[in-house]
Image (tube, grey):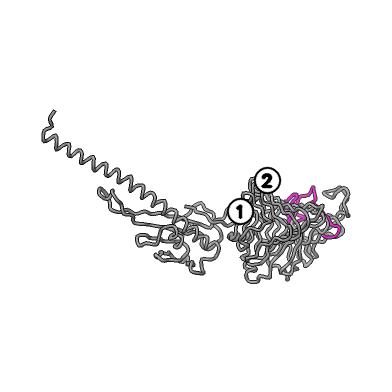
Amino acid sequence: MRLNDEDGQALVFVVLAMSFFLLGAVGLALDGSHLYAQRQMAQTAADAAAQAGIMSIFDGTNGTGSGGFSTSSTITCTTTDTRTPCKYASLNGFGSTASDTVTVSFPADTAAPGVTFSSDAVHLMQVTVQRTVTTTLVHMVGPAATTVKATALAAIVSVASPVPILVTHPTLSNSFTLSGTPNVTICGGAGKSIQVNSSSATAVSLGGNSSVDLSKAGPLDSGTCTTGTGADFGVWGGPTAQPGGITTGVGRYIAPASPVQDPLASVSPPSVPTIAGTMTALANGVSGCPASPNKSCVLYSPGLYTAGIDGKNSTPVFKPGIYYIQSTAGMVCSANCDMYMATGFTDGSTGTNTGWTGNMLVYNTGPSGNSTNAGTFDLGANGSIYLTGSPGSSSYKGILFFQDRSSVALSHSLGGGGAISLVGTIYMTNTLATMTATPSQYQSLSFSGHGGSSTTIQGEIIVGALSMGGSSGITMELNPGASVLVRQIALVQ
């Protein structure tokens, strides 16, 4: 069969049309793949810049150094910009050429609906990166260039999280110290068991044959040391290399690890009770007094104690409620002293009216008119102590021992020759502002155990400085479900 001229011309047009189609298809595939890769790179750069910038705000370093930046207005990065978000965008491939645009802004909270923000003045940082990308084959049938754009929104948020062992002093050397031969074991708790906020290069110190075992810590364990797989140990300063006595399991030793703000800073102290606390004799085997106590039992009622609480040569048994110590004497359980919770009572109108059953809070401040001159908690030289703190659902967030945040520098102690079992948070810290302005004004806690004794804490420890010592095992049983609001950074868009 012969093709006439018209048939031949039609065939040429068909071939040309298919050629343009195939060219467009190949161009679309090539340019599409290239543009997708550029889009992924742009998102990575935006995410990195937003996270680095918000971390700088989180750590309070955004106002200093070559990476410093103001949060008062939008930032348009230059090709040689050293400000933290601009630098991180550049390190991830965006911002170093004229075809790129990197902008940093600080939108209102409404830009991230449903997010619970921290108390920081600036909550949000948005980074937008943009690049003009030249097309290859597509420009023969379409645009010669297109724009690749990505946006990331990072925030400082408040999240419900278990509180780790938190050592709050911002600059102190040896703010977390182990000496002697204690084996400190932490079971359960959060993904990070210990956070030391000090910026000192020697913030953490392990001496002798001491050790910290976090291999059974973490949220997979209920506090029994059977199912945990490990947790992190973080320090803002150092040493940067993991000390030999620290075992983390699947967790990590992190240095530097950004400081964690006091998660209980917003908890208000209790009001001064209008009723004085009372002490009465209690028969053996009654209302929580052991059948055969080492010393005679004394039943304590909640209320105001202007002479402190001293359990020497006695067995204090505490009704539920708030014990408000307004004295230089503090709370003492030294020679021949055991402490227990009373049973069969509910705090009501004759106490501090908390409605608690089996829970107590001890608030320790100085005398009226001289509140900073408070006494210490000195518990357990050779006695056994079994106490339970405030309910976690209460406004006191599970606190057992609450030291006045304005106290002068004091050294507190827990543990000794007897069995210690405390349920609740040990909260002994001055404010960050106080410790920053006056580094010598902080609360330190010595936590120890000795051969033959059993020392366990089912709760958290939040203190200015913490030292652990002695010659036996100390077990921290952290509750993975206990939670308060803590600051964290997060990408929210």
> Total label count?
2
Horizontal relation, residue 41 to residue 190: left or right = left
The front one of 6 and 310 is 6
Q: Which quadrant of the view contains residue 469?
A: bottom right
Element marked by disc 2: loop
Is residue 338 rendered magenta in the image?
yes
Is residue 493 rendered magenta in the image?
no
Answer above or below: position of 365 versus 475: below
Element marked by disc 1: loop
Percent position (x, y) of residue 321?
75, 55
Percent position (x, y) of residue 227?
67, 44
Horizontal relation, residue 423 to residue 131: left or right = right
State which tag comes first along the sequence, 2 or 1: 2
The front one of 265 and 212 is 212
What secondary structure predominates along the stretch shown in magenta? loop
Which residue lies most toward the left here? 5
Q: Amino acid at mark 2?
A: Ser
The front one of 483 and 75 is 75
| Number of the front mark, 2 or 1 | 1
Q: Which mark is residue 252?
A: 1
Horizontal relation, residue 68 to residue 239: left or right = left
Q: Which mark is residue 222?
A: 2
* Residue at image point 79% right, 66% down: 329
* Residue at image point 65% right, 71% down: 438
Q: Amino acid at mark 1?
A: Arg
Q: Residues within 10 Å of mark 2 (few under 14, many from 20)?
A: many
Classify the position of the N terminus by image quarter.
top left
Percent position (x, y) of residue 384?
81, 54
- The stretch in magenta equals 334-361
The front one of 152 and 49 is 49
Q: Residues within 10 Å of mark 1 (few under 14, many from 20)?
A: some
